Amino acid sequence: MAGDGTDPPPEFGDEEAGDQPADSEAPPTESDEFTDRDYIRSTTREYKGLAEAVARAGEEEVEQSAVAASIPGVGTSVVGFEDVTGVEEEDPEQIEQIDRARRSELALRIATGLAVVAVFFGSLYAGALWVTLFVSLLILVAVAEFYQAVRRVGFTPLAFIGLPGAAAVMYVAWDSGPAAVGGVLAAVILLSGLFFVAAGRNYPLANIGVTVLGVAWVPVLASFAVPIFRSPEAWALTTALVVLTALNDIAAFSYGRTLGKRRMAPNLSPNKTVEGFLGATVITVLAGVVVGRFGLLEPLTLQSGVALAAAISVFAPIGDLAESAVKRSIDIKDMGSSLPGHGGVLDRLDAFMFAIPTAYLVYLWFGYL
């Protein structure tokens, strides 16, 4: 003990006095003087320089061929750029081929969309029966695509019951209105249950479920369009429904792509954002104001135009998300390929499946039906 009876604490890496005889101490070597702190400082400086060099290289548009680095304990080496990134330099010819394919896909998408729109409005102009027949054809294709999609993942939908049931829904809606289609849906459930009981098939719950879903989801919801087609103001009411729903979908895509940051339903559709939803709502409601205020589609007024636009802005995205939930549950991207450049029919009608009954209720509320 010295002085006040305490010894100063030993420094990191020092040995306490008295552990070894004084005459046995060897002179310090270079490795003894190279402490842990020195090593950390040295390696930090090395890596810092490397990080700055990589950052500068990423900002410059130069041909990146190799990177040289000196790392303590490893030495200096030259590493090829492809070895570092795992990505080879893109071939300009390959890029041009990709661009041509994208342009061709876009042209096909536009051509298909214009053809469907032309046939739809042409049949609407021809009369209620023709547009109902055309929409019924689309509905049958959509149901068939849905059954084919779930069949690929192991379900066994009863298409020979579901497809006639879908056609019967549209017929009953034409004859007696959408309120009467519940009887058709009940018949589909009854016949599906009888088949599984009589045939002794496995998994009746799941397979009856997808069979009934194909009828309830697509034709039952679409059947609410039939009274709109048969109304005296069919052209104006149908055009308002189609234009506002399509505008909402386009605006949501545009705003989501340019301003979207917060995902609205990441587990269902990662591309849908809150900003896209809000932007689409504003654009759609403004369109409803213009349509109603200036009498572009009589008998719609300012009040009914805004009500229709607001209702579509809420329920059309839900229809889109509902289809996304089904597709994600069976791990597919598109329901089918009936529409070149678009995928399946249901992929294009998903928003309309919820917008149609919503518009029907709005029109009924304002006395248009």
Image (cartoon, rainbow, N blue to C red):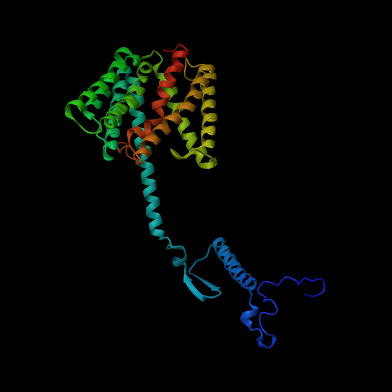
Looking at the image, the residue that sits furthest to the bottom is 23
What residue is rendered at 42% in x and 18% in y?
360
Residue 351 appears in the picture as rendered: yes
The image quarter containing residue 170 is top left
Q: Find residue 161 and report its image quarter.
A: top left
Residue 186 appears in which quarter of the rendering? top left
How far from the left and from the top, in percent, is residue 12? 67, 71
289 in relation to 112, above or below: above
Residue 281 on image: x %, y % = 52, 29
| Residue for point 31% across, 21% down | 132
Q: Position of residue 4 (x, y in %)?
A: 82, 71
* Foreground pick, 129 / 145: 145
Locate the C terminus and report the quarter of the image it occupies: top left
Q: Residue furthest right?
A: 3
Question: How many badges with numbers are in the image?
Answer: 0
Q: Which of the pair 49/11 is nearer the observer?
A: 11
Left or right, 6 with respect to 278, comes to right
- Please state if 5 lies on the left or on the right of 311 as rendered: right
Query: Residue 292 or 8: which is nearer the viewer?
Result: 8
Relative to 93, 155 lies left or right: left
- For the residue pair 166 and 39, the one nearer the viewer reads as 39
Indicate whether 4 appears above or below 19. Answer: above
Position of the N terminus by quadrant: bottom right
Q: Residue at x 47, y 71 (%)?
A: 79
Q: Residue 354: horizontal and vertical position, in percent?
A: 41, 26
Q: Is residue 138 visible?
A: no
Which residue of the protein is positioned furthest toward the top in this rendering?
367
